[in-house]
């Protein structure tokens, strides 16, 4: 997996966590105003630096309102990885987020335990939880038993942490594809 290759990512998470803001930040390199997503957005993002330089990510950003969550699973079929976005400042909804994530990746039909990157977004907010706290709340350790799972702090508004996040995603998928080849 090197320059010129492409990977498909499905980005989900509760509504208002910043998925579309992240997508546009990655695509256009700037903050864009968003509205709650009905259905999905898809953008191809070519990575210009770091470990994934030259790789094209096709990112599917699926709406997070509860009537859209049953559809999340159908996007996994052709995906190489899952990006699950949480709002680090919304303590009250982390439990709901955890349940949705487990339902998605642990349930039946999860095609081969996809690598899962959890993004602890909105790190710029003064009352945001630390990445360690979010990782604990989201059961990252437990998930790591069955699949590659990492959590990284980001801020979609400034773009902070995003290049590290794309590097990590790329590394996880590379490992996962290697493993599949051996079987
Ligand atoms: N402070 C702060 N606000 C953010 C950040 N990321 C997103 N937001 C704001 O959070 C709100 C929701 O962002 P969206 O990107 O529309 O959220 P979404 O996850 O796509 O929501 P749905 O489409 O409903 O699932 C917007 O007002 C964003 O400007 C961030 O890192 N920091
Ligand atoms: Mg959206």
Image (tube, rainbow, N blue to C red):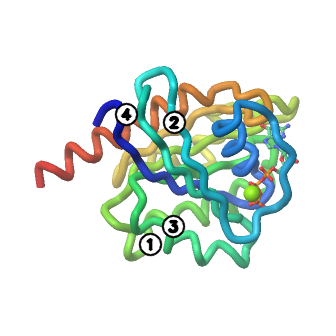
Q: Circle 2 sits on which residue?
A: 46
Question: Which residue does the image show at 36% across and 51% down from the upper left?
Answer: 147
Q: Are marks 1 and 3 in contact (CB under 8 Å)?
A: yes
Question: Mark 2 against mark 3, which lies toward the viewer?
Answer: 2
Q: What is the C-alpha distance between the residues marked 4 and 2?
A: 16 Å
Is label 1 in a helix, a strand or a loop?
loop
Are circles 1 and 4 on residues that touch, CB within 8 Å? no
Residue 29 vertical placement versus 177 (above, below): above
Q: Which residue is denoted by mark 4 in the rendering?
A: 171
Of residues 104 and 98, which is closer to you in this image?
Answer: 104
Could you tell me how far apart the alpha carbons at marks 3 and 4 are, in whole angstroms?
22 Å
- What is the secondary structure assignment of the residue under circle 2? strand
Q: Determine crowd level at label 4: few under 14, some 14-19, many 20+ residues with C-alpha closer than 10 A.
A: some
Q: Position of residue 117 (x, y in %)?
A: 51, 44
Q: Which secondary structure lies at badge 4? A: helix
Residue with the mark numbered 3: 104
Residue at the spot 75% in from the left edge and 51% down from the top edge: 17
Look at the numbered disc 4 and say if its residue's Cβ is closer than 8 Å to ligand 1.
Answer: no
Disc with the residue nearer the chain's start (2 vs 3): 2
């Amino acid at each position: 997996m090197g320059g010129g290759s492409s990977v498909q990512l499905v980005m989900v998470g509760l509504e208002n966590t910043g998925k579309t803001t992240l997508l546009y930040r990655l695509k256009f390199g700037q903050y864009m105003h968003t509205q709650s997503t009905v259905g999905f957005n898809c953008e191809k993002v070519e990575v210009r630096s770091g470990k994934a330089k030259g790789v094209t990510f096709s990112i599917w950003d699926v709406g997070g309102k509860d009537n859209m969550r049953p559809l999340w699973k159908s996007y996994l079929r052709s995906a190489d990885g899952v990006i699950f976005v949480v709002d680090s400042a919304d303590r009250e909804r982390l439990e709901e987020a955890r349940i949705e994530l487990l339902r998605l990746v642990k349930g039946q039909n999860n095609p081969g335990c996809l690598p899962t990157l959890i993004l602890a977004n909105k790190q710029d907010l003064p009352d945001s939880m630390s990445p360690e706290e979010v990782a604990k709340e989201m059961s990252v350790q437990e998930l790591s038993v069955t699949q590659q799972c990492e959590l990284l702090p980001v801020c979609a508004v400034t773009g902070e942490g995003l290049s590290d996040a794309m590097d990590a995603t790329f590394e996880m998928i590379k490992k996962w594809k290697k493993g599949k080849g051996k079987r």
